[in-house]
Image (tube, rainbow, N blue to C red):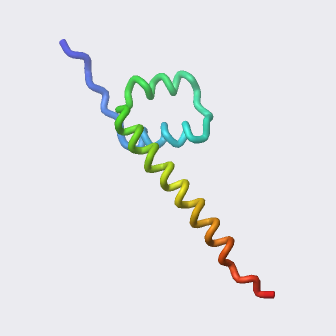
């Protein structure tokens, strides 16, 4: 018989990627993610999160630099 297929949600994948970005993760949770999550989903979510982070930093810098002085 075949082993049961574990389907995980995108929310679980996003959560795993965000915890990885922070760098705080229990080893047991990390091992569970390796066993259950699809590597292609992890790569896609990680690229999207990194892109959003970089775009957010660019927007923040532009907002700070363009602010009128008012003096």
State the image coordinates of residue 44 (x, y, percent, origin top left).
Answer: 39, 43
Residue at the spot x=65%, y=77% of the render? 66
Q: Residue at x 31, y 27 (%)?
A: 6
- Measured as percent of width and height from the top left, residue 10 is found at 37, 43
Q: Quadrant of the N terminus?
A: top left
Between 18 and 53, the one nearer to me in the picture: 53
Quadrant of the snapshot with the C terminus: bottom right
The residue furthest right is 71
| Residue placed furthest toward the bottom | 71
Q: Considering only vertical position in the picture, is 50 above or below 21? A: below
Q: Percent x, y for residue 8?
A: 35, 35
Q: Residue at x 38, y 31 (%)?
A: 37
Q: Please tell me which residue lies in front, 13 or 21.
A: 21
* Horizontal side of residue 40 vs 20, given as left or right: left
Asked where in the image residue 3 lies, by quadrant, the reply is top left
Q: Residue at x 46, y 43 (%)?
A: 46
């Amino acid at each position: 018989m075949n082993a049961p297929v574990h389907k995980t949600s995108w929310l679980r994948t996003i959560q795993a990627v965000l915890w990885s970005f922070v760098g705080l993760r229990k080893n047991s949770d990390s091992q569970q993610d390796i066993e259950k999550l699809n590597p292609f989903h992890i790569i896609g979510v990680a690229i999207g999160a990194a892109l959003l982070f970089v775009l957010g930093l660019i927007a923040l810098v532009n907002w700070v630099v363009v602010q009128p002085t008012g003096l």
